[in-house]
Amino acid sequence: MKTIIIIPTYNEGNNITLLILALQVQFKGMKHDMHILVVDDNSPDGTANDIKRLQLGFNNVHLLMGEKKAGLGVAYTRGMSYAMEHLGAEVVFEMDADFSHKPEDVPRLMAEIDKGADFVIGSRYVPGGSIPKEWGIRRKAISKFGNIVARYLAGIYSVRDCTAGFRAIRTSILRNVAFSDLGVKGYAFQIALLHQVLVLKAKIVEIPVDFLDRSAGKSKLGVKDIIEFILNAWWIRFDSLKTFIKFAIVGASGVVVNLGFFTLFLMQGINKYVASPMAIEISIISNFLLNNFWTFRGRKTKDRVRIRGLKFNVVSFLALGVSYGTFVALSIFFPNVAPQLHQLIGIVPATLLNYFLNSYWTFKEVDED
Ligand code: GDD
Ligand code: MN
């Protein structure tokens, strides 16, 4: 598989040459077509010159230049897009230039991709992983705090190390990420991307790594990054909530549409046993359209849409049957009650069935794709 290790750099002249040489040693023992893409923001220390020198000896070293320091997230967005569009990447890595991530761990992350993972995290916060012992209380607190914000504020509970910057990602997943919608420039990119791939139901695996302190140069994480990070975490939480609220509004609108049309048909003198399924069907269609063009508008659809559409129809048809069956039964047993009430009660079991079948069948299929 063609694999590109993306390394953003800003003033890493003392690290990058040694790191690339160490990576080349690792590549020798790997069966994949391994490349390196350095994304440099015109570092004043001339990091780019080191890369150009290395390019004379290695044809798997690539360089993407920016004009000025634009943030870690911008660098990764550019690097990932370039790797996919111009280098034909099947897998990309995120990796720091400062030896915080061990080159020896690259084959370990890759092995998880080989086993079928979409998104592998070199994690400091799973058993066996570690942060530098020499880290002061402030640096430790920032890292812990970042993960608490990501897990409990943004709602990414399932991942232990949400801010990790050492990851291997299949581009089959990455191609479905709307990078232009991420709206982040700095370190917040790490959780913004993680959130996106979770929405896409990527297979995420965390393996333990030791995160080492940098020996040369200094960290580029600034106050601006921390502020953006927290705002972005709120945004992610709000985003999931928004989808749920839209879902509920669509459901409620379906009830209004159903009962509205039912009443309208009755007023037209249509027999209630004919009016009922017609009204149910109209509400199913309006729910479907609203969910597709409003609730999930921003979401990129996957390949098997047609199969999902087919399943959706089967589920809707069953729901219609249950809803109508309830209506008929109630009409027979309680003939003196307003038919609107029968129609309304019929919505209840149909909604439950709809929910269970759609989440355990229609969407399960998407899971396994
Ligand atoms: N091109 C470019 N532009 N590169 C950048 C920029 C930028 O604006 N900012 C940082 N980098 C590069 C650095 O040169 C380095 O190679 C890498 O990105 C990570 O930057 P560091 O400054 O070393 O980050 P850190 O050690 O504070 O943060 C690490 O841990 C965080 C979690 O605690 C990184 O792995 C982060 O990704 C991670 O979130
Ligand atoms: Mn670092």
Image (spheres, grey):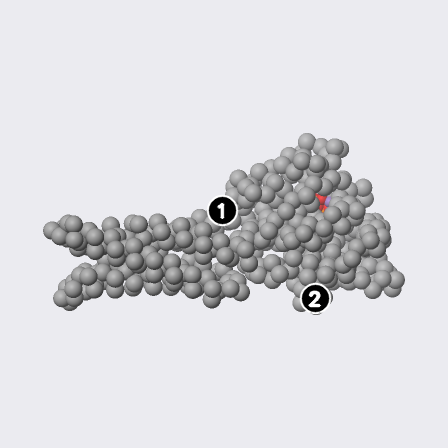
Residue shown at the point (66%, 47%) measured from the top left: 121
Secondary structure beneath dot 2 equals loop
Return the x and y of residue 132 as percentages of the image width and height.
74, 36
Q: Nearer the viewer, residue 310 or 218?
A: 310
Would you say the residues marked 2 and 1 are in contact, meaning their CB atoms lie under 8 Å apart? no
Q: Is residue 328 visible?
A: yes
Residue shown at the point (51%, 57%) measured from the top left: 366
Return the x and y of residue 88 as percentages of the image width and height.
70, 66
Q: Nearer the viewer, residue 14 or 265?
A: 265
- Could you tell me which quadrant the C terminus lies in? bottom right
Query: Which numbered disc flags the more N-terminal residue, 2 or 1?
Result: 2
How packed is label 1: few (under 14 Cα within 10 Å), some, or many (20 or more)?
Answer: some
Q: Nearer the viewer, mark 2 or mark 1?
A: 2
The residue that mark 1 highlights is 237
320 to 134, vertically: above or below: below
Q: Nearer the viewer, residue 130 or 281?
A: 281
User: Given the image, on which type of amino acid does mark 1 rest?
Assistant: Arg
| Label ID, residue 186 | none
User: Given the image, on which type of amino acid does mark 2 rest?
Assistant: Gly
Q: Is residue 50 left or right of residue 202?
A: right
Return the x and y of residue 7 as percentages of the image width and height.
74, 54
Q: Is residue 111 left or right of residue 216?
A: left
How packed is label 2: few (under 14 Cα within 10 Å), some, or many (20 or more)?
Answer: some
The residue that mark 2 highlights is 88
